[in-house]
Image: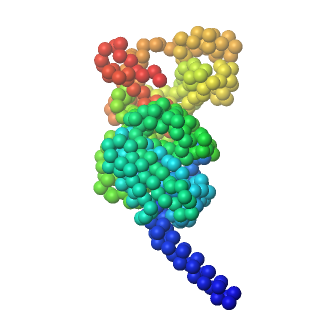
Amino acid sequence: MVVSAALEQLKRVARRTAELRARYVDQPLAKFRAWDSPQGTSQRQALLFLGTEVTCFFGGNRSGKTVLARVLAVCYALGGDHPAVVELCRQNGLDPATFPTGPGRVYMMALRADDSRKYHRDQVHDLLPANGVTWFGRNGKEEAEVRIKVPGYETEARIYFKSCKQGREAIQGDSVRAIIFDEEPPQDVWEEAEMRVLDQDGVLILSMTPLKGQTWVYEKLARTPDTVEKRAHWLNSANNPYLPRRAMKKFERMAESKRLARQMGQFIAMEGRIYTEFERGTHVCEPFDIPEEWPRYRAIDFGTRTPFCCIWAALSPDDVLYVYREYYQAETTVRQHVAHLDQFPESIADTWADPEDAQAVLQLQRDHEMYVIPAEKDVRYGIDLVAERLLPLGGVVGLKVFNTCPTVVQEFENYIWLPGSQKGADPKDRPLKR
């Protein structure tokens, strides 16, 4: 009798397991497998290394970053103990404990309601279980909401579809488990979102292709080093094995600056660039040993809260200026900066510095015996001189940057005119000095 009862219990468990599998585990969410590219960027690695507070997916068009955002929205809503989420984690080597247990509330944020209808609602629906799903305003012009029944719980999982165009007021006063942004939100909306996940120790997720250059996202999220709390991942569209070859051909035909942003997710200004002549393939080079007889120079721009910057350049006999070293540091004293500069005891022909900080110039000369020449402050004239060096003369450009100077490269790519300014326009027009 005992054995017979045990067998009947096993049969009931097996039937229940089969039912759950048919109902949840065989759903698209459970079958999702992130793509992996051992030789390049990896959607799977991005999924495995999520920040405990913030995760950013920076990537090109069709790189799979938005897919990850939608998948994570559903996972956070359903909870880490949901059968479909457990199966997804098993398929991708992810710990289900990444997600809180039980159903929760999640915001899926688009830039506009139209974007939400086009890119989020139907696509999220396709990841949900086949049964127990109720929509409110799915095709509406404003917000939408989907509620999902979760086995073993009386409360339902909820995903709210909102837009950044509604402003920070649309999310004020609420408490949610996760907020997922698709494309770059206004900074004030992001900061409001940070408050909305505090009560539940929740997370913020950002998926975007950076087409506006070095905005607040670059300064706050992309440029800062990764930590356990904040992770940033870059996805190259060329590494996506599901991308058709004809799509790659479109990337190959783009100008380099546009391709770097739209294929690789790099932060490069697309409009209003000052140095439109600058191209990485032409002006960035591998480091080499600079001959001792080449004259070397330094240029210094002071800063305390804004970064102190020093770059080193050497002039070749054929009049090519090579920028070969950079130092870029904020919130440090002049004495500390000089200590870093002194680590390179090489012969320097001349050092130029911004004359506006007279006290810092005096400190260099008096306390550190570093003679500096006041730099000319004619910005437009200086821009023209640099631009002339970027142009090829007899097939040779007059300025190159070692690839070990990433800040200089990024400055060339993101130095832009103030709105309404352009090269050769009114001399009062000037660069954006951010």
Kindly indicate the quadrant of the structure image that contains residue 6: bottom right
Quadrant location, the N terminus: bottom right
In-front residue for pair 17/203? 17
- The percent coordinates of residue 159 (x first, y second) are 46, 50
Whether residue 173 appears in this view of the structure is: yes
Q: In screen coordinates, is 218 left or right of 253?
A: right
Kindly indicate the quadrant of the structure image that contains residue 380: top left
Rendered residue at 35%/50% (across/down): 138
Relative to 342, residue 165 above or below: below
In-front residue for pair 312/112? 112
Rendered residue at 57%/50% (across/down): 50
- The percent coordinates of residue 254 (x first, y second) are 31, 43
Rendered residue at 60%/44% (across/down): 200
Relative to 197, residue 9 above or below: below
Relative to 368, residue 202 above or below: below
In-front residue for pair 72/433? 72
In-front residue for pair 330/46? 46
- The percent coordinates of residue 274 (x first, y second) are 37, 26
Rendered residue at 46%/13% (across/down): 377
Q: In screen coordinates, is 261 left or right of 367?
A: left
